[in-house]
Image (cartoon, helix red, strand yellow):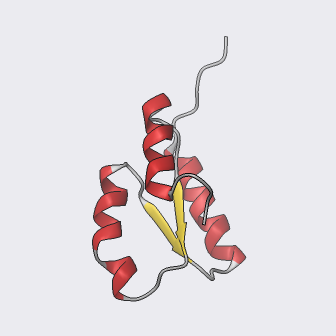
Amino acid sequence: MMPRMNGYELAREIRRHDSRVPIIASSGMTGEASEAGPEDGLAALGIKTLLTKPYAEEHLLRALAAELDATPAEKKD
């Protein structure tokens, strides 16, 4: 649990500033609660990855690698 805002609010705030930032969502909710509404909300915010806690380090590393591979590199002058 985060103070003052939830994950959806944080993602909206990040998107408001920069729509290119990859976001990996992580939730402790399991079963029907995580399979129903939240996926639709995450997709609407451009979030492709949801890790359900507890997750193995391997799953986190795989998710990070996938997001970084999918993110175009910025040109530096």
Name the residue at the bottom extreme: 31
Instruction: Find residue 21 and report its horizontal and vertical position in percent.
Output: 52, 39
Q: Residue at x 55, y 67 (%)?
A: 26
Is residue 46 found left or right of 13 in the rendered image? left
Q: Is residue 31 left or right of residue 29?
A: left
- For image coordinates 51% across by 39% down, the residue present is 14
Q: How many marks?
A: 0
Q: Residue furthest right?
A: 57
Q: Quadrant of the N terminus?
A: bottom right
- Position of 27 with respect to 40 (left or right) is right
Q: Quadrant of residue 35?
A: bottom left
Q: Is residue 1 above or below residue 54?
A: above
x 57%, y 52%: residue: 4
Q: Residue furthest top?
A: 77
Q: Is residue 43 above or below residue 20?
A: below
Placement of the C terminus among the 4 image quadrants: top right
Residue 37: image x %, image y %? 28, 70
Please tell me which residue is depicted at 29% across the width and 77% down the height of the picture.
36
Note whether 24 is above or below 31 in the view shown: above
Q: In x, y percent, where is residue 53? A: 59, 79
**Residue 65 in the image: x percent, y percent?**
61, 57
